[in-house]
Image (spheres, rainbow, N blue to C red):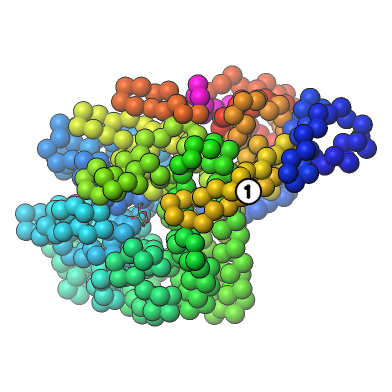
Amino acid sequence: MVKKEELLKKGFRYILALALTGTVFVSGAQNARIKIDIDRKIGEVDKHLYGNFVEHLGRCVYGGIFDEGSALADDKGIRLDVLDAVKDLNVSITRYPGGNFVSNYHWKDGIGPKDQRPPRMELAWARLESNRFGTDEFVDYAKRMGTEPYFSVNMGTGTIEEAQQWVEYCNVKSGPYYAELRKKNGYAEPHNIKYWSLGNEMDGFWQMGHMNAEDYSKKAREAAKLMKLTSPDIKLIAAGSSNYRPNADPNEWNATILKELRDVVDYIALHMYVGNPDNNYYNFLSTPLVLEERTRIVKGLIDREMANADRGNRPPIYIAWDEYNIWYRARGEDTMAGTRALEEHYNLEDALVISGFLNAFIRNANIVKMANMAQLVNVIAPIFTNEKGMFKQTIYYPLQLFAKNMHGTALDVQVNCETYNTERFPIGLGESTTQQKDVPYLDVSVTYNKGEVVVCVVNRNKDKAITTDLISQEGKFTGDLEVFEVNGPDIKAGNDFGKTTVQTVIKPALKVKSADKVTYSFPPHSLTMLKGRIQ
Ligand code: AHR
């Protein structure tokens, strides 16, 4: 943001349009600036920022990753076209099996001979659950994906004993009943599941077995005790608040569980879904700022508890944004339940919001150490199938670009550009409203890794390209800068079967010999990734 007085003093030519906050919009006067200083470090980017989520919901498992009898599946029922697309997303960690589903899921239903597994009423999303896909099938799938499996235990209708037995089944080599049962089921070696969450969205009135924060903390602490006695090296994730409806008090919940579980857990899970129900592009594009605000508030609560915690040598509690996405179209009575539940079709503006979330994770890399897009296939997902094939949705491309390129150290960059203010708007379904001020048109994150610098820029401006100087404060840009762009003919453009309108396009590289300033024009409504070296 550039202040009027500064401009006058420097004598720049400018066109003034005073926004509500007194922000000055500048046109033609000077380029926007991104100042990169390789010494200004935020933190290490955790590889688990590029996670995903598989829930027994709609067609995520059945008809998505697993489709017995399909001509596109192998003899184990795994859809091979889907698996290829999944592998190319570089998913670092995958949460399973829910979600709301897990709060009435009994894992023993999903092991052993398939024809002896009991079908159950699935109450969260109104389906018949055949249980033909369960623990062992998911572990096999995770291996083929090349992802770290992350399990959620049932803290709703489940018992702490059941949670302990699941850990025993998965992680104990041999001896006790459930370890031997796994061996009998064909898995001589333990699955070694390292990440376990203690329930899902337990503060939500919609959750089966919903509790208050004190009751949740007590149950979670006792479950954690049994689980850790069974497998001491596991990492535990507490269910933070996901209820931001008016009159809910999400940070009261977060404060209580952090206090009660501060010596026990490794992460607090946060969830966020946003949408554009009133078709206001600029409001929608500002929603990643709300995610960042929530991150900052929870970081403050964590810091307070860490000052009094007894954690030995363990690191502080981190944040796992283990569900995030855009979800607002498939929210009706007919789209919230059954086998076709939560099937969103994404467009370019959705891909830009996802890019904004990913930028926000990188900018908060010191505290956000896990993030999982919800979900992997068909259900609010980057991959969409029918019985004949699949296509990659718009949101696939930013996720893939980040997962493949944004690693190393997150840098704290200075961005100077025009800004805008939003009107008051609802963030997600039923949530309180917000107004966002001074939203920069350029949304930026930068990583630095052994000389390699990667700059991700969303130009939120719908109509104008933004010419920007990238300035290196320490060292020079050396050699070419590769350029990748996710864009489309307009913000509502989307993909479909046989039609890929929005995808990553490799643009001509920027020729740089050795310079401390590079100028690039970021096109309207785009994500651009610049990749090169600073030495
Ligand atoms: O991802 C869809 C649902 O959203 C999950 O089951 C639940 O945890 C959240 O409310």
Main SS of residues in magenta? strand
Q: Residue furthest left?
A: 115
> Residue 302 at what x, y percent from top left?
57, 69
Residue displayed at 34% across by 27% down: 496
Q: Is residue 218 magenta?
A: no
Give the residue number, with chain letter if any, for mark 1: 436
Q: Is residue 174 above or below residue 29?
A: below
Residue lying furthest top: 508
Residue 347 in the image, given as x and y percentages of width and height:
44, 32
Task: Quarter of the image for the N terminus: give it.
Answer: top right
Q: Is residue 126 left or right of residue 45?
A: left
The kind of secondary structure element at disc 1 is loop
Give the crowd class for mark 1: few <14, some 14-19, many >=20 residues within 10 Å: some
Residue at 59%, 19% (x, y): give it. Answer: 508
* Boundaries of the magenta span: 481-490
Number of numbered discs visible in the structure rendering: 1
Residue at 65% across, 22% down: 510
Write down the quadrant of residue 442 in the picture: top right
Q: Is residue 395 above or below residue 54?
A: above
Give amino acid for label 1. Gln
Q: Whereabouts is ligand 1, in terms of quadrant?
A: bottom left
Q: In the picture provided, is 167 more to the left or to the right than 419? A: left
Residue 483 falls within the magenta-colored stretch: yes
Res 21 visible: yes
Q: Is residue 325 left or right of residue 482?
A: left
The percent position of residue 35, horizontal first and vertical second, equals: 74, 39
Pinpoint residue 16: horizontal percent, then vertical percent.
80, 32
Give 343 or 65, whichever is nearer the viewer. Answer: 343
